[in-house]
């Protein structure tokens, strides 16, 4: 069995992880406009524009995004270590 | 990876067991991270009791709560089963007064709060201000959820409530101000020299109750709780009619009562019951009594048929 590569996020795969983040958010929030910026190993900034945020509190808006990407942030070897900044905006 | 049904219902139960639950790193006494520590300070200011869950002690729980809340960071605050937010959001809600409102704390309007500073205390405070005051060193008073008052010099943050008495201005945050009306400050001699004595009539405390007063209460059939904090063996020897033995189940029942419920504690002579009463006062109960002299005084003065031991 091959050794597991720990901390994939630190191996320079930022672009692939950014795409994964964007894809999951777009799948979870229909019609959302998503941009992801890699800030260094495992660290990302996310900006989501969606009309579905209308009427939701900031916490509820952010929960929708975090809920979509939870798998990428779970566990000690998660590819995403932290979302440094998460902006949820209305169009 | 999603949260399985068992893990979800365990968290439902955990969060449902208390009105306020904080998932944090470390404990209330020893937070292990700056964000958790910040939230603890805020909660201590607002409420006397809350449940904390140390995620560092349980790595499975630490991952599960993130999925449960759809929130990737710790600390996480739940109030009445609802997720409130993490550290940043809690700070914002605290500063805006919304968090206080969530806990049912009514913030006073300017002019609602009046305090009394004695002549001696005003002289002393003016001296302190002359010697140590200056920009960013205003005289401030904070009162935490257990009504511990703290007088200090420092920068007043946010939009402080300014209260004046005897020519001395005190600054308080809005939550402290909600607990300060009627407060007085005097100077008393202590073994360490003169010190400020803060007397707050709004502070919950334990009041003494004589056996005669207890008899009147029992005769009046007014609703109140008479708790016997002695051992089972002592209770088998003798008991006051209408009392209940304090056990874990009863303690939980009392804790769930409205904070103005009348609670009377008794033991053999009044020592153990004083401690029990102080515990409930510290939880925020405002109508707490200790039976002076205990069941022994009850036998002597009210009902000689109750055996003495």
Image (spheres, helix red, strand yellow):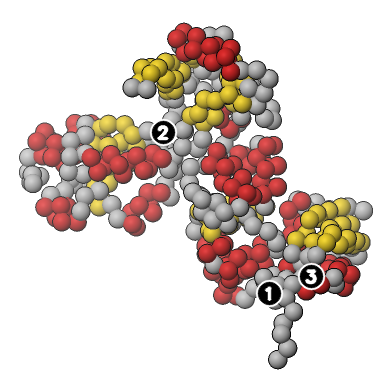
Q: Residue at x 45, y 28 (%)?
A: B202
The relative height of residue B206 versus residue B276 in the rendered view (above or below) is above
Label placed on residue B2: 1
Q: Position of residue B63 (x, y in %)?
A: 63, 68
Q: Is residue B298 left or right of residue B79?
A: left
Q: Looking at the picture, tell me which residue is in the foreground, A24 or B295.
A: A24
Density class for disc 3 (Cα within 10 Å; few <14, some 14-19, many ≥20) is: many
Quadrant of the rendered structure where residue B194 is?
Answer: top left
Q: Position of residue B259 (x, y in %)?
A: 43, 41
Q: Is residue A51 left or right of residue B23?
A: right
Q: Is residue A17 left or right of residue B202?
A: right
Discs 1 and 2 carry the same chain letter: yes
- Pointer 1 chain: B
- Pointer 3 chain: A
Label placed on residue B204: 2
Q: Residue at x 74, y 56 (%)?
A: A60
């Amino acid at each position: 069995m091959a050794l597991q590569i720990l901390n994939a996020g630190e191996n320079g795969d930022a672009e692939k992880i950014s795409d994964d983040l964007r894809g999951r958010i777009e799948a979870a929030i229909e019609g959302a406009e998503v941009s992801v910026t890699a800030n260094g190993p495992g660290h990302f900034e996310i900006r989501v524009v969606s009309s579905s945020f209308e009427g939701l509190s900031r916490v509820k808006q952010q929960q929708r995004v975090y809920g979509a990407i939870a798998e990428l942030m779970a566990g000690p070897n998660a590819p995403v270590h932290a979302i440094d900044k998460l902006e949820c905006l209305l169009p | 990876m999603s949260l399985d049904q068992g893990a979800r219902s365990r968290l439902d139960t955990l969060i449902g067991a208390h009105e306020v639950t904080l998932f944090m790193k470390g404990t209330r006494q020893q937070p292990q991270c700056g964000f958790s520590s910040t939230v603890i300070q805020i909660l201590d200011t607002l409420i006397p009791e809350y449940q904390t869950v140390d995620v560092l002690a349980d790595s499975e729980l630490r991952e599960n709560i993130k999925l449960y809340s759809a929130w990737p960071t710790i600390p996480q605050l739940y109030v009445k089963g609802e997720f409130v937010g993490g550290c940043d959001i809690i700070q914002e809600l605290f500063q805006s007064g919304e968090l206080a409102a969530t806990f049912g704390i009514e913030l006073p309007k300017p002019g609602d709060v009046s305090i009394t500073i004695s002549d001696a205390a005003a002289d002393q405070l003016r001296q302190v201000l002359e010697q140590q005051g200056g920009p960013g060193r205003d005289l401030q008073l904070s009162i935490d959820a257990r009504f511990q008052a703290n007088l200090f010099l420092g920068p007043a943050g946010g939009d402080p409530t300014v209260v004046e008495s005897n020519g001395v201005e005190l600054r308080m945050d809005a939550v402290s101000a909600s607990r300060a009306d009627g407060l007085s400050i005097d100077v008393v001699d202590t073994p360490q020299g003169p010190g400020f004595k803060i007397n707050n009539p709004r502070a919950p405390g334990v009041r003494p109750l004589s056996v005669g007063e207890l008899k009147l209460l029992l005769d009046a059939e007014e609703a109140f709780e008479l708790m016997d904090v002695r051992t089972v063996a002592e209770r088998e020897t003798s008991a006051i009619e209408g009392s209940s033995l304090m056990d874990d189940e009863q303690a939980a029942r009392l804790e769930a009562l409205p904070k103005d419920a009348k609670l009377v504690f008794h033991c053999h002579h009044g020592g153990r019951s004083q401690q029990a009463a102080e515990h409930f006062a510290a939880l925020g109960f405002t109508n707490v009594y200790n039976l002076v002299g205990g069941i022994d005084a009850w036998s002597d003065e009210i009902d000689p048929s109750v055996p003495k031991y």
